[in-house]
Amino acid sequence: MKKTSVKNKPVINIIDEDNLISSQFGVEQQNRVNKGKQYEISVDDKLLMERIICKKLSITVYEHGIDHTCIADHFYIGKTGIYWMESTIILDENHADRLNTKLRRVKKFRKDVTDFVIFFEKNPDQKSRNNIQRYKKILEAGGWTVCINGEETSKYIKNLGKIEGNPDKIKIANSINIPINKLVYHPSNRKIDEARCRELAKSIVKEGFISQLNVVPEWKRGRFTGKYVVFEGNHRLHAVIEFCIKEWGFAIDELPCVLVDWIKSDDKVKVHELLILVNTTQKPWGMPDYVISHLKEAKERNQKHKEYSYDKLDWLYRITKKTHIDNVVNKDFKDSRFFYIFGPVDFDNAKIGKTIDRDIVKIGEYRISETEFENIMKPFVMNVAMPFVKWFDVNLKNWDKKVGDVFLKYLYHEYKLQRYTMKDIHKLIDGFKLLGDKTPVQVKKEPWDAMWETLEKML
């Protein structure tokens, strides 16, 4: 059935998809997955003890009309390089070939990765464990560094810790009061909400300034300027300056700050990571906050592909306004509607609704080419999606809007993979409009499958 393409995709991930493994291989394979997860955690703990703080990273590589999801168990950006590291308890010839294919795809997408490392722990259940050295040679020929037992793994991790030179002690920030005229807004912070700042200012007048701003020293051209960049607390700073001082005339000379003095403002990558980390542990960021923040950071760092990609995610938000030049139906839509249809939808997800891959947007890894946007996404959004959504909202007011939106997700996904032509798309939309009472009221499996069975007969 064309509505899902998961079964047509080559699986390139190491065994880490619990539900997929469970359905295909049963309890025995699930136990192996659990052992693999435990080993992955043990390796992560070893890395952490050497101050190698990693994150799990998932990227999607578009190749030959198919999206391939590649996952790093331990992704580390260090002083000496960028490390893509994997933990596995399974190693055979097929697995080695898949890993080499993964490496090739990742290098195509992430040219900045310098080291690819595999940590392997022998699994007693593996029948072919006597050929490990041969598989190791296959992987090394493909570009991997391979540690095939606990001793080699520990040695590699300890050596990495030494060459990275990460400190043994946990650094502690200083608390100081800083004059307001020495405080600078962070350029990549999310858009200032004036109404929220006014309410913050009223609270400050009533209760006092009872929190703090997080800052780093501002450095330009290799020198400390004497000022400090606020990476957390920009709304509070704005509330004090624009409302408490300028509008209402209160006298406030300085504000309490937590100074992270071991990071300089010209270390833009690190400061941006702090900006997201600290702000998202306070008031949760929405997806537009991540999009705008990464867009600003990409512009500042002259990362053209990232800037282009996040500008197109922002475009999906902007075109919801009927005043936008690309809004061909002259109708306002909910500002996130097209983002959740045409953003990085996770079609490997078993759910019928196919949710968005938020993580890839949050960590700054979303990418789209100019060719894909101009030739596929933009024409589809303007010429197919907008007219259809307008029709759906007018004619199916009692239906859950997700029905129409998810229908478009499937159409676009299949069109992007060249499984549907534009002629097919219009036939399916015309068929959808004729479903009448057979139109699913909600996105649920049985009515959804029945709908597609009816529609595909029209092709």
Image (cartoon, rainbow, N blue to C red):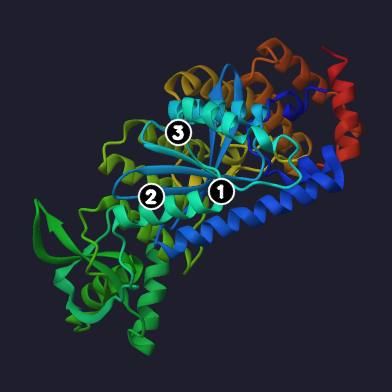
Question: Residue under circle 3?
Answer: 312
Disc on the earlier residue, 2 or 3:
2
Question: Residue under circle 2?
Answer: 293
> Can residue 2 be spotted in the picture?
yes
* Callout 1: SS: loop
Disc on the earlier residue, 3 or 1:
1
Q: Could you tell whether 362 is left or right of 217 in the image?
A: right
Where the C terminus falls, by quadrant?
A: top right
**Which is nearer the eye, 352 or 70?**
70
Which image quadrant for residue 98? top right
Task: Give the number of marks.
Answer: 3
> Can residue 444 be spotted in the picture?
no
* Callout 3: SS: helix
Q: Is residue 64 above or below residue 438?
A: above
Q: Are marks 2 and 1 in contact (CB under 8 Å)?
A: no
- Name the amino acid, label 2: Ser
Q: CA distance from mark 2 to mark 1?
A: 42 Å
Q: CA distance from mark 3 to mark 1?
A: 45 Å
Q: Could you tell whether 332 is left or right of 403 in the image?
A: left
Which image quadrant for residue 347? top right
The residue that appears at 71% across and 38% down in the rendered structure is: 393
Disc on the earlier residue, 2 or 1:
1
Where residue 361 appears, x then y in whole percent? Answer: 50, 44
